[in-house]
Amino acid sequence: YYFNSERCYSLGGFPCDVASIEGSDGNKDCSGHVRASNNHLEKNIWHWTTASCEIQVTVGSNGMIAVIHNPNDSKPAPTAAHVDINNTVSDFSIYWEGDGSYPTKDNDCGNGACSLTQDDTCICSTAVEENAVFR
Protein backbone atom coordinates (compact mmCIF):
# COMPACT_ATOMS: atom_id res chain seq x y z
CA TYR A 1 0.00 0.00 0.00
CA TYR A 2 2.80 2.42 0.89
CA PHE A 3 4.49 2.12 -2.52
CA ASN A 4 1.14 2.36 -4.30
CA SER A 5 0.40 5.58 -2.40
CA GLU A 6 3.81 7.06 -3.22
CA ARG A 7 3.40 6.23 -6.92
CA CYS A 8 -0.08 7.74 -6.91
CA TYR A 9 1.17 10.97 -5.26
CA SER A 10 4.09 11.22 -7.72
CA LEU A 11 1.58 11.13 -10.60
CA GLY A 12 -0.45 13.95 -9.05
CA GLY A 13 -3.18 11.70 -7.65
CA PHE A 14 -4.07 10.43 -4.23
CA PRO A 15 -5.20 7.07 -2.85
CA CYS A 16 -8.84 6.81 -1.86
CA ASP A 17 -11.40 4.27 -0.83
CA VAL A 18 -13.13 2.47 -3.71
CA ALA A 19 -16.46 3.71 -2.32
CA SER A 20 -15.45 7.30 -3.19
CA ILE A 21 -14.53 6.64 -6.84
CA GLU A 22 -17.08 8.04 -9.26
CA GLY A 23 -18.40 5.45 -11.70
CA SER A 24 -19.23 6.11 -15.36
CA ASP A 25 -22.86 6.54 -14.30
CA GLY A 26 -21.91 9.43 -11.98
CA ASN A 27 -22.52 7.31 -8.89
CA LYS A 28 -19.97 8.14 -6.16
CA ASP A 29 -20.28 4.65 -4.67
CA CYS A 30 -18.16 2.67 -7.09
CA SER A 31 -18.09 -0.51 -5.00
CA GLY A 32 -20.73 -1.94 -7.34
CA HIS A 33 -18.29 -1.50 -10.21
CA VAL A 34 -15.64 -3.64 -8.53
CA ARG A 35 -16.27 -7.12 -9.79
CA ALA A 36 -14.83 -10.52 -9.14
CA SER A 37 -15.00 -13.79 -11.03
CA ASN A 38 -13.61 -17.07 -9.77
CA ASN A 39 -13.90 -18.51 -13.29
CA HIS A 40 -12.39 -15.63 -15.28
CA LEU A 41 -9.60 -14.06 -13.20
CA GLU A 42 -8.52 -11.91 -16.16
CA LYS A 43 -11.82 -10.00 -15.91
CA ASN A 44 -11.41 -9.06 -12.26
CA ILE A 45 -11.14 -5.35 -11.49
CA TRP A 46 -9.49 -4.40 -8.22
CA HIS A 47 -8.60 -1.15 -6.48
CA TRP A 48 -6.24 -0.26 -3.67
CA THR A 49 -8.01 0.75 -0.50
CA THR A 50 -7.12 3.04 2.36
CA ALA A 51 -8.44 0.44 4.81
CA SER A 52 -5.93 -1.64 6.72
CA CYS A 53 -5.73 -5.32 5.91
CA GLU A 54 -4.50 -8.16 8.05
CA ILE A 55 -2.79 -10.98 6.19
CA GLN A 56 -3.66 -14.29 7.76
CA VAL A 57 -3.30 -17.97 6.90
CA THR A 58 -5.64 -20.90 7.17
CA VAL A 59 -4.02 -24.11 8.37
CA GLY A 60 -5.62 -27.29 7.09
CA SER A 61 -5.73 -30.61 8.92
CA ASN A 62 -2.77 -31.71 6.75
CA GLY A 63 -0.59 -28.73 7.79
CA MET A 64 -0.87 -26.97 4.44
CA ILE A 65 -1.62 -23.25 4.54
CA ALA A 66 -3.42 -20.74 2.34
CA VAL A 67 -2.87 -17.00 2.56
CA ILE A 68 -6.05 -14.99 3.15
CA HIS A 69 -6.69 -11.27 3.44
CA ASN A 70 -8.94 -9.83 6.10
CA PRO A 71 -9.71 -6.25 5.05
CA ASN A 72 -10.81 -3.97 7.88
CA ASP A 73 -13.22 -1.90 5.86
CA SER A 74 -16.46 -0.33 7.03
CA LYS A 75 -17.88 -0.77 3.52
CA PRO A 76 -16.22 -3.92 2.20
CA ALA A 77 -15.89 -4.64 -1.48
CA PRO A 78 -15.29 -8.18 -2.79
CA THR A 79 -11.97 -9.82 -1.88
CA ALA A 80 -9.93 -11.56 -4.60
CA ALA A 81 -10.90 -15.25 -4.65
CA HIS A 82 -7.36 -16.57 -4.21
CA VAL A 83 -7.07 -14.76 -0.85
CA ASP A 84 -10.72 -14.91 0.27
CA ILE A 85 -11.37 -17.21 3.24
CA ASN A 86 -14.48 -18.68 1.62
CA ASN A 87 -13.02 -19.27 -1.85
CA THR A 88 -9.28 -19.84 -1.64
CA VAL A 89 -7.83 -22.97 -3.21
CA SER A 90 -4.23 -21.80 -2.92
CA ASP A 91 -2.99 -24.23 -0.25
CA PHE A 92 0.74 -24.93 -0.13
CA SER A 93 3.20 -26.78 2.10
CA ILE A 94 5.55 -25.02 4.49
CA TYR A 95 8.25 -26.11 6.94
CA TRP A 96 6.99 -26.15 10.54
CA GLU A 97 9.77 -25.37 13.04
CA GLY A 98 10.52 -27.47 16.10
CA ASP A 99 8.90 -30.87 16.21
CA GLY A 100 6.89 -30.16 13.05
CA SER A 101 3.57 -29.77 14.85
CA TYR A 102 1.13 -27.16 13.60
CA PRO A 103 -2.18 -25.66 14.76
CA THR A 104 -5.09 -28.12 14.54
CA LYS A 105 -8.52 -28.58 16.06
CA ASP A 106 -7.05 -31.29 18.33
CA ASN A 107 -4.46 -28.96 19.92
CA ASP A 108 -6.87 -26.00 20.26
CA CYS A 109 -5.35 -24.32 17.20
CA GLY A 110 -1.86 -24.19 18.67
CA ASN A 111 -2.99 -23.75 22.28
CA GLY A 112 -5.14 -20.75 21.36
CA ALA A 113 -2.55 -19.00 19.16
CA CYS A 114 -5.02 -19.25 16.26
CA SER A 115 -8.81 -19.37 15.89
CA LEU A 116 -10.92 -22.38 14.91
CA THR A 117 -13.30 -21.99 11.95
CA GLN A 118 -16.60 -23.75 11.31
CA ASP A 119 -14.89 -26.18 8.92
CA ASP A 120 -12.32 -27.21 11.58
CA THR A 121 -9.36 -25.35 10.11
CA CYS A 122 -7.31 -22.81 12.05
CA ILE A 123 -6.89 -19.15 11.08
CA CYS A 124 -3.62 -17.60 12.23
CA SER A 125 -2.28 -14.04 12.10
CA THR A 126 1.04 -13.48 10.39
CA ALA A 127 4.08 -11.31 11.01
CA VAL A 128 6.74 -10.33 8.52
CA GLU A 129 10.31 -11.00 9.56
CA GLU A 130 13.16 -9.93 7.33
CA ASN A 131 16.32 -11.96 7.87
CA ALA A 132 19.00 -13.25 5.55
CA VAL A 133 18.42 -16.95 4.97
CA PHE A 134 21.83 -17.56 3.43
CA ARG A 135 25.00 -15.75 4.45
Image (cartoon, rainbow, N blue to C red):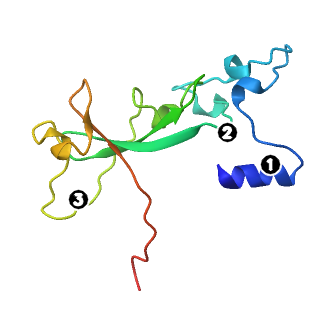
- For disc 2, the marked residue is 48
Q: Are marks 3 and 2 in contact (CB under 8 Å)?
A: no
Query: Looking at the image, which residue sits at the far right?
Result: 12
Q: What SS does tag 1 mark?
A: helix
> For the residues marked 2 and 1, what is the alpha-carbon distance in whole angstroms?
11 Å
Which badge, 1 or 3, comes first in the chain's sequence? 1
Query: What residue is drawn where x is 87% and y is 51%?
Result: 11
- Of residues 5 and 66, the one drawn nearer to the viewer in this rendering: 5
Quarter assignment of residue 35: top right
Query: What residue is drawn where x is 22% and y is 63%?
Result: 97
Taking 129 as reference, is 47 left or right? right
- For disc 3, the marked residue is 96
> For the residues marked 3 and 2, what is the alpha-carbon distance in whole angstroms?
32 Å
Identify residue type, mark 2: Trp
Which badge, 2 or 1, comes first in the chain's sequence? 1
Taking 118 as reference, is 11 left or right? right
- Of residues 9 and 87, the one drawn nearer to the viewer in this rendering: 9
Vertical placement of residue 41 versus 99, above or below = above
Query: What residue is drawn where x is 25% and y is 23%?
Result: 118
Identify residue type, mark 3: Trp
Which badge, 3 or 2, comes first in the chain's sequence? 2
Identify residue type, mark 1: Cys
Taking 49 as reference, is 82 left or right? left
